[in-house]
Amino acid sequence: MDRIFLIGFMGAGKTTIGKQLAKALDYDFFDLDHYIESRFQKTIAQIFEEQGEEKFRQIEQTMLKEVGSFEKVVISTGGGTPCFFDNIEYMNNAGLVIYLQSSPEALAARLMACKNKRPLIEGKNEEELLEFIEKTLDKRNQFYQKAKHVVDMEHLSTKESIIEYSNKLATFINDLSHSK
Ligand code: S3P
């Protein structure tokens, strides 16, 4: 298995799990948003503001295919990445796609603390945020459900549980690679 793609809503824990999983597999770790920021020397918020979401989605697709050409990598994608163009089919062909699933309530609680770096939810109060998550998840679920493997993140909150789960996931992925 050359590439592991982590997908899921903003605040699902893709970066946190991704770093641990890469360590456990001895793979390199890439966070797609950070990769875009360093390639373009702009924050995601700046790209949204200066060029709009449509242009951001084009950049995101191009960059996904760039990191998707690397080998032995864990890639944490942006919350919207699998939901545009043929990105989910591309990822399913290029590697193993894992969906990190959480309830809207758990996502809202995590996102309240760090929503200002995320242009789609910046400035929303708790109630508006929950409503946005429920509505957006409803549309995005059809794409998220195309992942080959689903991880329930609802109960993975402590550092210990994340390390333990990432190690289990790494064993599962190694077994999967050896059985092919
Ligand atoms: C987005 C999620 C963000 C980032 C951008 C748009 C989305 O990534 O790509 O702000 O559409 O859900 P994270 O999921 O890493 O926050």
Image (tube, rainbow, N blue to C red):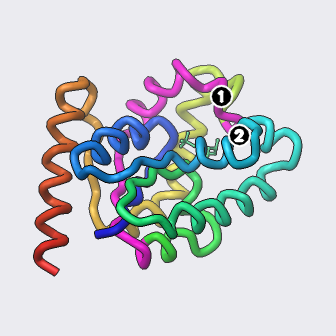
Q: Position of residue 73 (x, y in %)?
A: 39, 57
Label 1 near ligand 1 (CB < 8 Å): yes
Q: Is the Cβ of the residue at disc 1 closer than 8 Å to that at disc 2?
A: yes
Q: Observer-nearest residue: 19 or 152?
A: 19
| Residue at numbered disc 1 | 117
- Tell me what residue is drawn at x 28 percent, y 57 percent: 150
Q: Amino acid at mark 2?
A: Ile
Q: Observer-nearest residue: 134 or 178?
A: 178
Q: Position of residue 106 (x, y in %)?
A: 38, 31
Q: Position of residue 95 (x, y in %)?
A: 37, 70
Q: Position of residue 108 (x, y in %)?
A: 48, 29
Ligand 1 visible in quadrant = top right
Q: Dot 1, how many residues are within 10 Å of its Cα: few (below 14), some (14-19), or many (20+)?
A: few
- Tell me what residue is drawn at x 11 percent, y 66 percent: 175
Residue 151 covered by magenta stretch? no
In the depicted structure, whether residue 28 falls above or below residue 164? below
Which residues are drawn in magenta?
Answer: 92-120
Q: Dot 2, how many residues are within 10 Å of its Cα: few (below 14), some (14-19), or many (20+)?
A: some
In the depicted structure, whether residue 15 falls above or below residue 136? above
